[in-house]
Image (tube, rainbow, N blue to C red):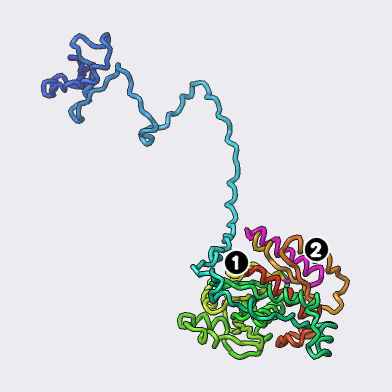
């Protein structure tokens, strides 16, 4: 055919474009894997597998057109597989179900982290190997000579009522002993003087302001300091400029912030005494930070550091907390509190707030602290108003360890320096009852 070379001839199963070039290209040995896989009937008379030579410009390679086709796995080489387009003559493929579009779900809203209140610092006070009071085992030993066995006992002198008047008129010769009221007051004082092992921390709290929380802290602290012989201090932990320091004569301009700055240098009671103010009852008060230029309130760690410093010098620490339960310092207060005093006014909203305080404590894992709390119903109005106080007492008595009602007192309403001698007798007895109720908890934990 003109214009073209002669048709290629077949020689030993190899096609060449030019027969004259056949001698210059050695025959390549066939791979063993191709020979093994080809069927016997598909092998030509030479015993070789048909192959093609694509010319001198390319490297020769053997292509087996008769053997089994190699299988390509998409999972192994996904990039090497080309998409196969179906023929236009093939039957229409079965349509896959149309995917249902579902809009992406919005990202979850950030949930504020709620830290659990750490109460690990409230541990059982350490026990020491202290021997008991020596008692003589033999009848004639010195320990058997005590005041109870040797001295003649006399009746306690009555403190009120007609018994006191008879004792005074008879010149002390006629003594009918204590009246029932006198015995009750003596019992209250004895309970308020329950010994403290270690340091007992009392938190005075309320969800509502204006219910007499600061007044309760100052009066309870003054009663403890007056009846007991150990050291008592009240700390103002109100983050919004508390007024506890106004209930005692101001002797120091220092605040809790100054104590925190110098806590590393406080090593003696005389050192910490420079930061406190003391009332005539011996109650000491540590004022809150009242600097108007301060940019941050008392934090949880600040309160913990304050208590860590004070508990080395004081047996009782009372804390006047701020309104509410969610500010940062309150976490430290509740985390370190040994017992609670929940204050309510003799009103519907005040009682509901106090009961909600107990609900909050129970909901946050402090059921025992709420159960052991003492509730104070403070009458801030003369006459008590139209509220049935007895109903309030019954409500809180079912939820807490004790309930004490403080009557209205004009001296407390003034909000100035607290003087126990200025209180009405009924108010004085009520605060003794409160001190006794709180003091009963000293025997449980120090």
Q: Residue at x 71, y 86 (%)?
A: 418
**Figure check: 235 above or below 168:** above
Query: Residue 401 at what x, y percent from top left?
Result: 71, 64
Residue position marked by numbered label 1 in the rendering: 445
| Residue extent of the magenta highlight | 343-366
Q: Is residue 138 left or right of residue 33?
A: right
Q: Is residue 24 left or right of residue 440?
A: left
Query: Residue 192 at what x, y percent from top left?
Result: 68, 75
Q: Is residue 209 visible?
A: no
Most extreme residue toward the left is 23
Q: Is residue 355 visible?
A: yes
Query: Residue 322 at what x, y percent from top left?
Result: 66, 74
**Dot 2: within a 10 Å radius of its alpha carbon, few (fewer than 14), some, or many (20 or more) residues?**
few
Q: Say which element carries label 2.
A: helix
Looking at the rendering, which quadrant does residue 442 occupy? bottom right
**Residue 362 on the magenta segment:** yes
Q: Say which element carries label 1.
A: loop
Q: Residue at x 22, y 25 (%)?
A: 61
């Amino acid at each position: 055919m003109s214009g073209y070379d002669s048709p290629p001839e077949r020689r030993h199963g190899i096609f060449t474009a030019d027969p004259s070039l056949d001698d210059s290209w050695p025959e390549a040995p066939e791979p063993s894997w191709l020979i093994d896989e080809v069927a016997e009937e598909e092998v030509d008379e030479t015993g070789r597998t048909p192959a093609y030579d694509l010319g001198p410009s390319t490297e020769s390679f053997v292509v087996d057109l008769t053997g089994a086709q190699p299988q390509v796995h998409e999972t192994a080489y996904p990039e090497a597989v080309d998409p196969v387009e179906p023929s236009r003559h093939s039957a229409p493929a079965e349509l896959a179900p149309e995917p249902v579009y579902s809009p992406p779900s919005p990202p979850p809203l950030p949930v504020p982290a709620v830290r659990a209140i750490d109460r690990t610092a409230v541990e059982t006070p350490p026990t020491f190997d202290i021997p008991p009071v020596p008692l003589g085992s033999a009848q004639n030993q010195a320990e058997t000579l005590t005041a109870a066995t040797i001295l003649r006992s006399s009746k306690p002198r009555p403190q009120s009522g007609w018994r006191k008047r008879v004792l005074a008129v008879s010149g002390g010769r006629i003594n009918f002993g204590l009246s029932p009221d006198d015995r009750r007051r003596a019992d209250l004082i004895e309970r308020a003087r329950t010994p403290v092992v270690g340091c007992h921390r009392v938190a005075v709290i309320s969800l509502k302001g204006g219910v007499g929380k600061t007044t309760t802290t100052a009066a309870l602290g003054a009663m403890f300091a007056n009846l007991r012989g150990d050291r008592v201090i009240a700390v103002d932990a109100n983050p919004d400029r508390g007024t506890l320091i106004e209930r005692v004569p101001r002797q120091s301009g220092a605040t809790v912030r100054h104590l925190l700055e110098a806590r590393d240098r406080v090593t003696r009671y005389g050192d910490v005494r420079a930061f406190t103010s003391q009332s005539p009852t011996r109650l000491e008060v540590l004022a809150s930070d009242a600097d108007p230029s301060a940019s941050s309130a008392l934090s949880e760690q600040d309160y913990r550091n304050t208590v860590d410093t004070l508990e080395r010098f004081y047996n009782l620490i009372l804390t006047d907390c701020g309104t509410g339960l969610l500010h940062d310092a309150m976490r430290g207060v509740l985390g370190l509190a040994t017992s609670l005093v929940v204050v309510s006014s003799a009103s519907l909203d005040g009682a509901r707030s106090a009961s909600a305080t107990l609900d909050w404590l129970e909901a946050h894992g402090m059921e025992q602290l709420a159960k052991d709390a003492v509730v104070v119903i403070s009458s801030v109005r003369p006459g008590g108003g139209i509220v049935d106080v007895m109903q309030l007492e019954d409500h809180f008595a079912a939820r807490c360890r004790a309930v004490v009602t403080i009557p209205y007192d004009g001296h407390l309403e003034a909000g100035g320096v607290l003087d126990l001698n200025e209180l009405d007798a009924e108010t004085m007895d009520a605060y003794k009852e409160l001190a006794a109720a709180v003091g009963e908890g000293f025997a449980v934990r120090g």
